[in-house]
Image (spheres, helix red, strand yellow):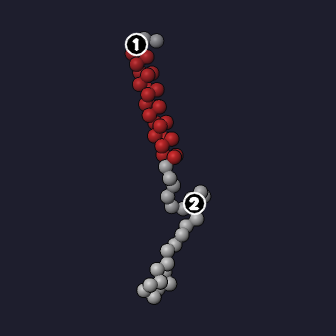
Amino acid sequence: MNPQENADLLAALMRQEELLKQLIASINKPKLGLHSDAGSCKIYCNRQHGGLW
């Protein structure tokens, strides 16, 4: 391999590493909305003004 090929390979590997870090970060983000891992939810009922909710 010549020096230019080595530099291109190194740049591609660094870009791949950055993309993998972004992928891992997006996987580890908390999930919002409806999904299979949804936990329990609590609803606060303010009956002070005569309403049920």
Amino acid on which disc 1 is placed:
Pro
Residue 6 percent coordinates (x, y): 43, 16
**Residue assigned mark 2:** 38
Q: Residue furthest top?
A: 2
Residue 44 percent coordinates (x, y): 49, 74
Question: Who's the residue at 48% across and 46% down the image?
Answer: 26
Circles 1 and 2: CB distance less than 8 Å? no
Residue 1 percent coordinates (x, y): 46, 12
Classify mark 1: residues with Cα within 10 Å, few (<14), some (14-19) or many (20+): few
Q: Where on the picture, by quarter, is residue 4? A: top left
Q: Residue furthest bottom?
A: 50
Which disc number belongs to residue 44?
A: none
Pair 1/2: label in front: 2
Describe residue 2's horizontal placement relative to residue 39 as left or right.
left
Q: Secondary structure at mark 1?
A: helix
Which disc number belongs to residue 3?
A: 1
